[in-house]
Image (cartoon, coloured by chain):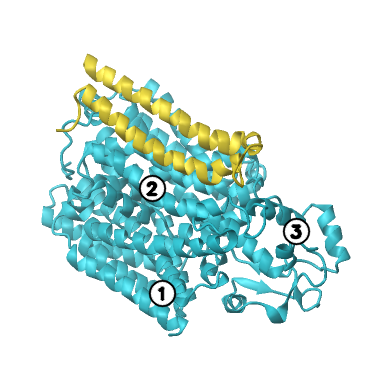
Chain colours: A yellow, B cyan
Amino acid sequence: MDKSGEAYWKATLGLLTKILAVWFLVSFGAGILFVDLFNQIHLGGYPLGFWFAHQGSIYIFVALIFYYAKKMGEIDRKFDVHEE
Amino acid sequence: MDLQTTIYLVVGASFALYIGIAFWARAGSTSEFYVAGGGVGPRVNGMATAADWMSAASFISMAGLISNMGYGGGLFLMGWTGGYVLLALLLAPYLRKFGKFTVPQFIGDRFYSKTASTVAVVCLLTASITYVIGQMTGVGVAFSRFLGVSSETGIYVGMGIVFVYAVMGGMKGITYTQVAQYIVLIFAYTVPAVFISLHLTGNPIPQLGLGSDLVGTDISLLQKLDQIAIDLGFGQYTTTTAGSTLNMFVYTLSLMIGTAGLPHVIMRFFTVPTVADARSSAGWALVFIAILYTTAPAVAGMAKYNLISTVNTAVATNGDLYAADSSLEVAKKPDWMARWEKTGLLKFEDKNGDGRIQYYNDKTKNADVLAKAEAAGWKGNELTVNADIIVLANPEIALLPNWVIALVAAGGLAAALSTAAGLLLAISSAISHDLVKGVFNPNISEKGELMAGKIAMAVSIVIAGYLGLNPPGFAAGTVALAFGIAASSLFPAIMMGIFSKKMNKEGAIAGMLAGLAITLFYVFAHKGVFFIKGTDFLPLIGGPNPFFGITPEAFGAVGALVNFIVAFTVDKFTKEPPEHIQHLVESVRTPRGAKAVDGAH
């Protein structure tokens, strides 16, 4: 792979790592591992940890995929590998 | 118009719509048959994916499961949606760039090996066939409950409908019927939820209603639910976990990986025109799925409250739950209870002979609850509720008009049919494209392959119908197995094919086989070899859930881990893949040059 190809792949992996970190934190972190801690806080009538497990994670997942699609589009154009 | 006639009219109209679409979207080429010609827009594909993905289990059973499990039910919500993040980031765009018809074809080409693609075909067929059996029985159940026909008749009608649009239209016919089916099922799911939310909390949006105060009080719905659930021994709704925290963690992860690795979902992303579309289409799919998946927990919580407060009148008045006149008199029970008692989904037995219905958890470990129940003269729980009731009887519990009940019937059928069709396409394309063209007869003509595809589809429908009519003695275990196989064999193989340039065929094949073997071993130890009763071998592995208390349903993630470890170990000691394969991986990683999907080997 040439230099620009390597840089492109590195940028891609960087973006994936960031997004998967958020993916992990909201579901496995706030929704499961630290749920008791988050339940101390309330969001309206919802205990926050319960909200992440039953609602919040799903909303954030949707946002993450669209953010990924947008950022990947930018990376594609920056390294000039986008589709014509 | 009476209820039965309304249901026939609404369901009949929905079937007419699907068949109409089938005639409009006939497939004339293999490209149309396998990938709908590759010209499906990201939103349309997202909607079709949502219908493909949401099965009879999502529509009918999930809310009931959550209702029973409380907080722990969140593992289904997070697991079955979080997988789309993995699918969008790790698989879909790269497989779309690769530009072929099927998942085994990617594995075969990337690992330059017919053996690898054949192993993938076996994994795909096992996962999809076990999954489709559940859908066919789901079709039968939905028919028998709503239309008053036998479950067998229901399966025959269901087979007929799927036959028309799947054989004629292939992916093209399936895509556009799935869009119609999505619209039917999402209305059917959300309309009753909106009315119930409005009735209980005054907020028409169920997602907000679940976090709101009960009408006329300043106590929140969830707080009240927690309180009555504890008082009646069911355990606090918002905190009860599914097994241990570790089990819930691994279970959620297994569902996520399994979701991302299910071939009938992956292949939907071959139908979009570009790599960029594959990325955004996964987002749209999740938007359409999220509409149902964020409504489900609201339906679950509200239905639990409704059910308990119907049976125990002291819930609404804040009175003593254990007072003699709090329990509902049998003579005063609502019509829907009587109606669903006939189906056997709701059972009542007056154990203490007081002519009233007592509903509580008599198996609770809470001594306080048991003491109160005994003092009140309660002799055990008297009402048994099947989890499916939560969605099926929802419109009646909320006193909604007949057309809403009919809509729920059409929605349940749409959910089961759309998933069955997607699975059948995955099965038939693996047979006609990966086995017939890929292995047995590479020189088959385009026309011949299209015909082979249609014949494979027809045969698959007959087999799925037969298995649906004569389920092989196991029901609940099958879906877990499908997810376990997808998670432990297909997902790691595809991912390593993209993210590791050096992964060779020996590593990939060994990994797939190891992941599959360990998962099957663990599941079969609990449920019997191929689910045959009496062949389970738990003593051999030291009792149930011997691996850190992880249940067999949750084991897929462990299988995936084994797959990765074995693959990288074997890869270390065998020679690296040829130069042209490493170039293939490089080209898969960049979007430029993506062409329309074709089937050339």
Mark 2 falls within which chain?
B
In the rendered image, residue B504, in percent from the top left (x then y), is placed at 32, 27
Disc assigned to residue B154: 1
User: Which residue sits at x=35%, y=42%?
Assistant: B283
For label 1, the SS is helix
Number of numbered discs visible in the structure rendering: 3
Q: Visible in this render: residue B151?
A: no
Quarter of the image that includes the C terminus of chain A: top left
- Closer to the camera, B459 or B339? B339
Cβ atoms at labels 2 and 1 below 8 Å apart? no
Q: CA distance from mark 2 to mark 3?
A: 37 Å
Q: Visible in this render: residue B67?
A: yes
User: The residue under label 2 is which amino acid type?
Assistant: Val
Q: Earlier in the sequence, mark 3 or mark 1?
A: 1
User: Which residue sits at x=64%, y=65%?
Assistant: B307
How many other residues sit within 10 Å of disc 1, few (<14), some (14-19) or many (≥20)? many
Drawn side of residue B452 relative to residue B543, left or right: left
Disc assigned to residue B232: 3
Q: CA distance from mark 2 to mark 1?
A: 31 Å
- Closer to the camera, B542 or A84? A84
Q: Residue furthest bottom?
A: B1
Drawn side of residue B500 relative to residue B301, left or right: left
Mark nearer the viewer, 3 or 1? 3
How many other residues sit within 10 Å of disc 2, few (<14), some (14-19) or many (≥20)? many
Q: CA distance from mark 3 to mark 1?
A: 39 Å
Q: Earlier in the sequence, mark 2 or mark 1?
A: 1
Quarter of the image that includes the N terminus of chain A: top left
User: The residue under label 1 is which amino acid type?
Assistant: Gly
Disc assigned to residue B287: 2
Residue B333 drawn above or below residue B458: below
